[in-house]
Amino acid sequence: MDVEVDLYSGRPNPRFPLRPAAVDELGRRIAALTPATGGERPYDGLGYRGMRVLTGPAETVAELVVSGELVTLRTPDGSLRHLRDPGRALERWLLDQGAEDLAPEVTATVRQELAR
Amino acid sequence: MLRITADVYSGRPNPVADITDEAEVRATLSELTRDRTLFVGPRSSEAQTGGLGLRGFWVETFDDGLARDFDLESRVFLPAGPQAPAGRAAEVAERLITTADWHRAPDTFAGTTPPIGTSSFREFLLGQLASGGRASVADRVEPAGGEQAESPAVTCQIELGAFNPGFWNNDPNVMSSNNCYNYASNWRTNTFAQPGRGCGNMYTQITCDEVTRAALCDGMHHRFDCFPDTEKPRFLVALVVIPGGGDYHWYRKHVEGFWGHKPGPTAARNVDNSGNVIFNPETADRGPYTIFCGYFYGCDSQRKRIN
């Protein structure tokens, strides 16, 4: 399972692998989130947009987008589920998982955005 | 009789043509009404009339019997080009163009504009249909000194395409596999195309100079370094970068007058980071892409080379 840091427009986004223990922990963290209400949408402009967890074809979640206190799960049939990520805790945790693999300037940029 | 009005101009009256042969009228209406999703009624059609280039055709009937036989309103609008629904819209539009008698169409031109030759008018509309709503315009160096200044030193003919975000956004695989360079080049490669990779000499760092070099290697030109007609479509694009070499981004100008762009794997749009429609990429809210590198022309061989 890979995590893509959705940061760039022209260059391919940086990615890092999520280790097996972290995959399990991700499942536990998602299960603890509460549903989001309203019509919020993840930020999708220029600059840092969030983390995208890329799952395998056998997974029940096709894509997981973590962005700005909002977690969006897309199932293989295309349906969406929205959860709330208070304080962007899940986003910060995901960034920590990539600390060894990501370029320092990428980590620094994302940390700066998360501190806003 | 059927009256066909080609919705193609913005500053002068649209050309009108009639189909008078009764058998042809019925055959045309039969073709038109086979798929009613292709056209819209008189009220909702007003929304279809934005933009330059061929937008569609008004089709009018003049007797209630014909309208009843085909269950039609007296006036319906058939969108053409990028506004048209997928499927048979282009086929039906082509039938209208080829069967209507356009010999009076040049008379509908107002003012001193020279009429387009009768024989070429049908070709003009067919060309508009084939170009998907694209328009050729003159791109000039703005003369210094306002309107009293002498003629501009350089004028290049370029093309402006209609804004069609659905092409990039409706399929999740297309959206995630094509970036701003694909969008600016108007060429889907599904490879997240990189400047210079197609010509075998990709950028080595992300600066204005280096990304420019790579894009020129793919075949782009600096603005006002004109391309010949054989390189149509010649789109006007703009390059920006993040200070420190983080990333680059491209915009493309559209026939509607605004600029479109596609931030990486996200949706194509015509608004900036503040949600404002982009009429000037130099002053738009570009987030961290604060360095404006300049304007360029793409061209047909460049877009087919990108990878």
Image (cartoon, coloured by chain):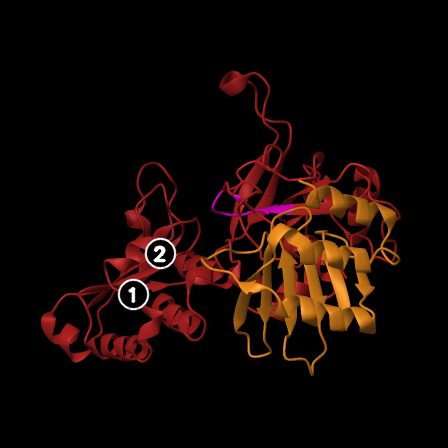
Chain colours: A orange, B red
Q: Residue drawn at (31%, 66%), measured in percent from left and top?
A: B100
- Say what secondary structure mark 1 lies in: loop
| Residue B35 percent coordinates (x, y) | 33, 78
- What type is the residue that disc 2 sits on? Gln
Highlighted range, magenta: B251-258
**Would residue B264 be seen by someone viewing this image from the given angle?**
no
Q: For mark 2, name the chain.
A: B
**Residue B257: within the magenta?**
yes
| Residue B119 percent coordinates (x, y) | 40, 59
Q: Earlier in the sequence, mark 2 or mark 1?
A: 1
Q: Nearer the viewer, residue B251 or B135?
A: B251
Q: Residue drawn at (37%, 48%), measured in percent from left and top?
A: B9
- What type is the residue that disc 1 sits on? Val
- Say what secondary structure mark 2 lies in: helix
Residues at marks 2 and 1 on the same chain: yes
What is the number of the mark on residue B40?
Answer: 1
Which residue position holds label 2? B48
Give the CA distance from mark 2 to mark 1.
Answer: 9 Å
- Marks 2/1 in contact by CB < 8 Å: the verdict is yes
**Would residue B42 be seen by someone viewing this image from the given angle?**
yes
Give the answer, above or below, for where B42 lies relative to A104.
Answer: below
**Quarter of the image where the C terminus of chain B is located:** bottom right
Give the answer, above or below, for where B151 lies relative to B125.
Answer: above
